[in-house]
Image (cartoon, rainbow, N blue to C red):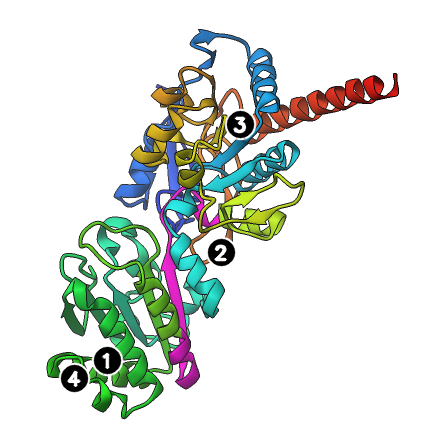
Amino acid sequence: MTQPSVTGNVTCLGCGCACDDIEVVVASERIVDARNACQLGRQWFGDGQVPSIIRVDGADVGLEQAVGSAATRLCEAARPLVYLAPGLSCEAQREAVAVADLLRARLDSITSATALIGILAGQEHGSASATLGELRNRADVLLFWGVDLEARYPRFASRYAPGPPGMFTPEGRRSRTVIAVDIERATATVDSDVRVAIEAADELAMLTALEACVRSPDASNNLTSLAERSRNTARELATALLAARYTALVYDAEPDDRSVRTSARFEALTSLGQALNDRTRCAALALRAGGNRSGADSVLVAQTGYPCAIDFARGFPRYVPHDGTVLDILRDRDVDAALVVGDPMGISSDLAHSLSNVRSVVIGPHASDAAWGARGVIIDTGIDGIHVSGTALRTDDVPLPLRATLSAPRSTAETIRAVASNVRRTLLNAHDIESKALGS
């Protein structure tokens, strides 16, 4: 066994918090420890070993042949799809967008099946947010709305709030008032000063009442449809929130099956944040899961103007979030070839089942583990952030560097760039042949 090497300040993509203080210990080309990492981080790093398989229709081939075959199949498709799975650096995401643009393809990401409803609410109403550092330094009242920090964002409380001291919260937890709202089994897993339990069926009504009380102190007198206890709860919560110098409203942007909850809560939470900003300072923070999902949204917005559910068919990007998500178009059989980039193990079972009926090209870490891609082109790559350096965005859209600690035979970004080059060449050749035919 070789002498272990330690790489410090490594960014973890196990969840959206993207902790960048991880010390990765490597020995004999394996990760043997990830110091400071939570359970999600340790699971994400693993031992750093990934398969290195390249196959076309089940047969092992060389990289050049696989890339050429992928480009050919995508160019032959009438309605191709490019889908961004989790686990990509921003650099790899940009290369995938370029392929979608060249192909005039549909372009989507995991966001459309997870955080799209909240994004639409922010687009319709506006959203005042903040960085995690600002919450740590300024927030003196924190409202955690049914978010499972312990399981989904284990280091949030200790790294950002309410635990550590900040510039204007010098005593850390003792400088803050923490309000936890539990919606049946969807408990807010955080130590709190005030804890409120709400039935799932009453969540939207409580949010509406709370917003009304924030906007007008006398509003609770008119909320006759609510039980007296609920009116009193809304009034007390509003009073506590408005007493803050800086309120943080923290909730989960990702699906949560602990209790059946209305998706309308995202619009109500966004409106509550806006109402609080009329009276005090409030930052609403919707937490995202791991794999650089916020990075995908930002890359797509930067290059197309939209975060997901994009159609290049007319030669320019169109936003079709209500009936043009990946599940919509696969259900309508409006896709005849798919390029899936990223870790296919991070996509939902519903999407995996739908993709099994489409000719697929799968490029990313653990691509060979996707059973539904066996009939197509499979190219395993290294993991961005473990084998490949690059950039990722934290859940608050702060960019962080990804540091490679192990080597890999190929990166996702380089492979997609090679596919794009082949696609470009194939399309140019087809254009030249068509021009000659017309000229004759």
How far across and how far down the image is residue 345, in percent? Answer: 35, 31
Height in image: 220 above or below 409? Answer: below
- Mark closer to the chain start, 3 or 1: 1
**Boundaries of the magenta span:** 274-295
Question: Is residue 145 part of the magenta span, yes or no?
Answer: no
Q: Nearer the viewer, mark 3 or mark 4?
A: 4
What residue is at 26 percent from the left and 86 percent from the top? 239
Q: Is any part of residue 4 visible from this angle?
A: no
Height in image: 172 above or below 299? Answer: below
How far across and how far down the image is residue 199, in percent? Answer: 14, 65
Height in image: 207 above or below 376? Answer: below
Q: Is any part of residue 124 visible from this angle?
A: yes
Q: Which residue is mark 1?
A: 237
Q: Nearer the viewer, mark 4 or mark 1?
A: 4
Mark 3 and mark 1 residues within 8 Å of each other at the beta carbon:
no
**Residue 157 has which mark?**
none
**Residue 411 has which mark?**
3
What residue is at 18 percent from the left and 85 percent from the top? 224
Which amino acid lies under the numbered mark 2 shown in the image of this protein?
Asp
Q: Nearer the viewer, residue 232 or 295?
A: 232
Instruction: Classify the position of the C terminus by image quarter.
Output: top right
Mark 3 and mark 2 residues within 8 Å of each other at the beta carbon:
no
Q: Which residue is mark 4?
A: 232
Q: Nearer the viewer, residue 75 or 42?
A: 75
SS category of the residue bearing label 4: helix
Residues under labels 3 and 2: Cα distance?
Answer: 24 Å
Mark 4 and mark 1 residues within 8 Å of each other at the beta carbon:
no
Height in image: 316 above or below 58? Answer: below
Residues under labels 3 and 4: Cα distance?
Answer: 57 Å
Q: Which residue is mark 2?
A: 397
SS category of the residue bearing label 3: loop
